[in-house]
Image: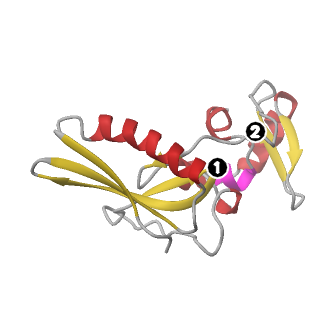
Amino acid sequence: MRYLAAFGPATVMDIRTWSVLPGLRAVTERLRPRLRTFRDERGRELFDLPDAPRPDPETPAPVRFLPEYDNLLLSHADRTRFMSEEHKTPLFPGNGGALGYVLVDGEFRGTWKIVRQRDGATLTVEPFTALSRQETDALAEEGERLLAFAAAASAARDIQFAAPA
């Protein structure tokens, strides 16, 4: 139930990926009367809490800067809901992750990294595809908030956008 509160709607395999527990088909069947079910575009059954917020599918999702090992990446068996096969990123074990992930309208669209210098910090955003002016502005605004948090002690803060890879 806690998983679904954070990541639903989700398949049984999504829940298993997150929890690493076997036998979750039986658990979801036992919980079925307390859950709401859906079918995704591929016909897979999704489970969710009955009173969970579900915005209209046309509602744009805000831009987000996710850290290297964000639970969004670790909590789904099938990441194609937000990540294309073309830009599928490996999740390196241990401390191998060095880049954060940029979500634009709920889709993995690039990476980010903060480099600290003696007198400041620079957030570099590397998109995979061209960004619209509106998307760039939204990322810059969210990037300012990220730098204010992650590099609060830095006297100078800058945001740079690399050319699409």
Residue 36 falls inside the magenta stretch:
no
Whether 44 is drawn above or below 142: the answer is: below
Q: Residues within 10 Å of mark 1 (few under 14, many from 20)?
A: some
Q: Which residue bears the numbered disc 1?
A: 106
Q: In the structure shown, which secondary structural element does the residue marked by tag 1 occupy?
A: loop
Whether 99 is drawn above or below 142: the answer is: below
Amino acid at dot 1: Gly
Q: Which residues are magenta?
A: 11-16
Q: Is residue 146 visible?
A: yes
- Residue for point 71% across, 40% down: 8
- Residue for point 46% across, 40% down: 142
Residue furthest front in the image: 133
Q: Residues within 10 Å of mark 2 (few under 14, many from 20)?
A: few
Residue furthest top in the image: 51
Quadrant that contains the N terminus: top right
- Residue for point 64% across, 60% down: 79
Q: Is residue 48 left or right of residue 142?
A: right
Amino acid at dot 2: Thr
Q: Position of residue 29 (x, y in %)?
A: 83, 41
**Distance from the alpha carbon under mark 1 to that under mark 2:** 10 Å
Q: Tell which circle, 1 or 2, labels the residue nearer the N-terminal end.
A: 2
Tell me the quarter of the picture where residue 149 sits. top left
Tell me which secondary structure the magenta stretch mostly adopts.
helix
Residue 91 is tagged as none
Residue furthest left in the image: 118
Q: Position of residue 39 (x, y in %)?
A: 89, 50
Q: Is residue 47 left or right of residue 107?
A: right
Residue 59 is tagged as 2
Residue 14 falls inside the magenta stretch:
yes
Q: Is residue 74 visible?
A: no
Towards the viewer: 160 or 58: 160
Q: In the structure shown, which secondary structural element does the residue marked by tag 2 occupy?
A: loop
